Image (tube, helix red, strand yellow):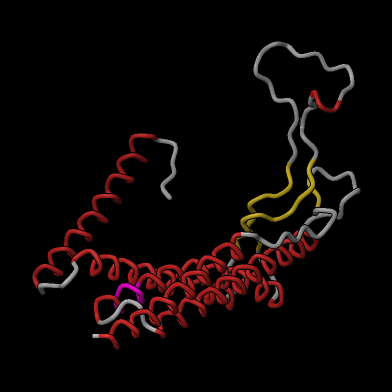
């Protein structure tokens, strides 16, 4: 992600990033053609997927080091309770539309926070959630790398490919759900530790309740990978039957 206050500088940084990625892809294509690969596209996809996995591994190492250190800890969405600084139309019964675009209602439920002096238990809880969530990000890259490489090395429909897809589905479901839950619980506990309790007439207070919402997307991804596992298993069976007829 590229951000900044100067739009030309942001666009230039984005263009440089795109150019670097394009140069990397071009280098991979040149190398695959030089080695006379049976499928240049699969070679490039597998290589990019391996780079993806390597970045995730480096990110996981960084998160683990941050978790065991005493550095400040960034929390993306710490639950808070904060009154809007001005009265809003939704808070009054005598509201009359002015006929122009206006802010009707607004609420703040979370804030990006940096916490110092976090104790070991909370730091471990948050780090576990962050590492599990990042692990899920790396699973698709690992799946693509493995499937592409196996398609290059031998039959695409292999029994081990089906098992690998099923294992990936379980990893995504467990790590994706557990990572989000640990992060939600840890963020709420940190808010209760560093902010006044709700109802104390403070400008910013901790959230009133534990807001634990299991994400739905890990289940959807796991179902998709599970379906692919069944499809590859059927493909492997048909492939064996076809080879037996030849």
Where is residue 84 shown, x and y percent of the image?
Answer: 77, 35
Please say if 144 is above or below 23.
below
Q: Residue at x 53, y 72 (%)?
A: 226
Which quarter shows the C terminus?
bottom left
| Nearer to the camera, 65 or 163 | 163
Magenta segment's dominant SS is helix
Where is residue 129 shown, x and y percent of the image?
Answer: 62, 70
Residue at the extreme top: 99
Residue at the extreme bottom: 244
| Nearer to the camera, 202 or 75 | 75
Quadrant assignment, res 201: top right
Compared across the picture, whether 168 is left or right of 153 comes to right
Compared across the picture, whether 239 is left or right of 118 comes to left
The residue segment tinted magenta is 145-150
Where is residue 123 shown, x and y percent of the image?
Answer: 66, 72
Where is residue 178 shown, x and y percent of the image?
Answer: 66, 71
Please say if 9 is above or below 195.
above
| Nearer to the camera, 198 or 222 | 222
| Residue 75 drawn in magenta | no
């Amino acid at each position: 992600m590229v951000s900044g206050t100067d739009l030309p500088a942001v666009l230039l940084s984005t263009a440089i990033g795109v150019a670097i990625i394009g140069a990397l892809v071009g280098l991979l294509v040149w190398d695959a053609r030089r080695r006379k690969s049976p499928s240049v596209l699969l070679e490039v996809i597998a290589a990019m997927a391996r780079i993806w996995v390597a970045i995730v591994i480096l990110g996981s190492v960084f998160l683990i080091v941050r978790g065991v250190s005493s550095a400040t800890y960034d929390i993306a969405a710490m639950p808070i309770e904060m009154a809007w600084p001005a009265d809003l139309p939704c808070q009054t019964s005598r509201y009359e539309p002015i006929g122009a675009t206006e802010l009707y209602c607004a609420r703040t439920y979370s804030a990006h926070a940096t916490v110092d002096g976090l104790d070991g238990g909370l730091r471990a809880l948050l780090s576990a959630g962050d590492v599990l969530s990042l692990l899920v990000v790396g699973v698709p890259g690992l799946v693509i790398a493995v499937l592409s490489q196996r398609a290059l090395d031998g039959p695409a429909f292999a029994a081990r490919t089906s098992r690998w897809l099923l294992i990936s589905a379980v990893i995504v479901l467990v790590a994706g759900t557990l990572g989000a839950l640990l992060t939600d619980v840890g963020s709420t506990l940190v808010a209760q530790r560093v902010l006044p309790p709700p109802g104390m007439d403070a400008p910013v207070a901790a959230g009133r309740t534990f807001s634990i919402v299991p994400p739905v997307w890990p289940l959807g991804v796991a179902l998709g990978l599970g379906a692919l596992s069944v499809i590859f298993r059927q493909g492997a069976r048909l492939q064996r039957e076809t080879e037996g007829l030849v």
